[in-house]
Image (tube, grey):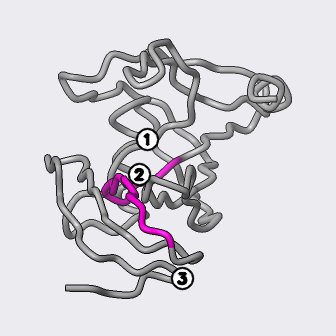
Amino acid sequence: MERKHGPYTIKSSECLHRDEFVEVWLDEVVRPNGEPGRYATMRMRPGVAVLALDSEGFVHLVRVFRYAVGKECVEVVQGMIDDGEEALEAARRELSEELGIEARELTDFGLVDAVTSQVFSPSRVFLARGLSFGEPDRESTERMRPVKVKLDEAVRMVE
């Protein structure tokens, strides 16, 4: 069944792959200029990203191998929101699981959606402060190491 999608008309839509993390779709479309085309998209479950900042100005990140880019990356704590879970709960859970950190204060910086041309991957971003440290409780598939750097150095790392 044809349907409008912004300036596009979707003629047909087929799910090529679906698992617990992602769906991959292939749409036959009519582009805004009237030409036929195809559009492949990925839909990820909503997630959270948490920047943990301690009282001495250090940020607590993770170093983890990312399959898609084929290398280790230094990142903020992140993960998917479980069914029935609020974003704030997910942020607390991920911070505790990945780094063993509890935060007295979590500030919601809003929703971001990176790589929007082909990927739907909304992520709510939080700043964690008032940190206390314990032992992480990572999932068996997670292989990561903690990284502690000054905030200004962390900013330089992504420039």
In this view, the mark in front (2 or 3): 3
Q: Which numbered disc covers residue 59?
A: none
Q: Which amino acid does label 2 sit on?
A: Arg
Residue 7: assigned label: 3
Asked if the residue at tag 1 contacts the one at tag 2, i.e. Cβ–Cβ closer than 8 Å, the answer is: yes
Q: Is mark 2 on a helix, strand or loop?
A: helix
Please tell me how crowded label 3 is: few (under 14), some (14-19), or many (20+) other residues with Cα within 10 Å: few
Residue at label 2? Answer: 92
Tell whether 101 sits left or right of 140: right
Residue under the point 28% across and 56% down = 26
> Is 47 in front, or is 146?
47
Q: Name the residue at the front extreme.
A: 35
Asked whether 25 or 152 is in front, the reply is 25
**Bounds of the magenta segment:** 35-49
Tell me the amino acid under the disc marked 3: Pro
- Neighbour tally class for label 2: few under 14, some 14-19, many 20 plus, Cα within 10 Å: many
- Name the residue rendered at 31%, 65% in the picture: 28
Residue under label 1: 95
Image position, residue 68 (x, y; %): 41, 25
Secondary structure, mark 3, is loop
- What whole-number distance in Å separates the C-alpha atoms at marks 1 and 3? 40 Å
Magenta-highlighted stretch: main secondary structure? strand
What is the CA distance from the residue labelled 2 to the residue labelled 3? Answer: 39 Å
- Nearer to us of marks 1 and 3 is 3
Classify 27 as above or below 69.
below
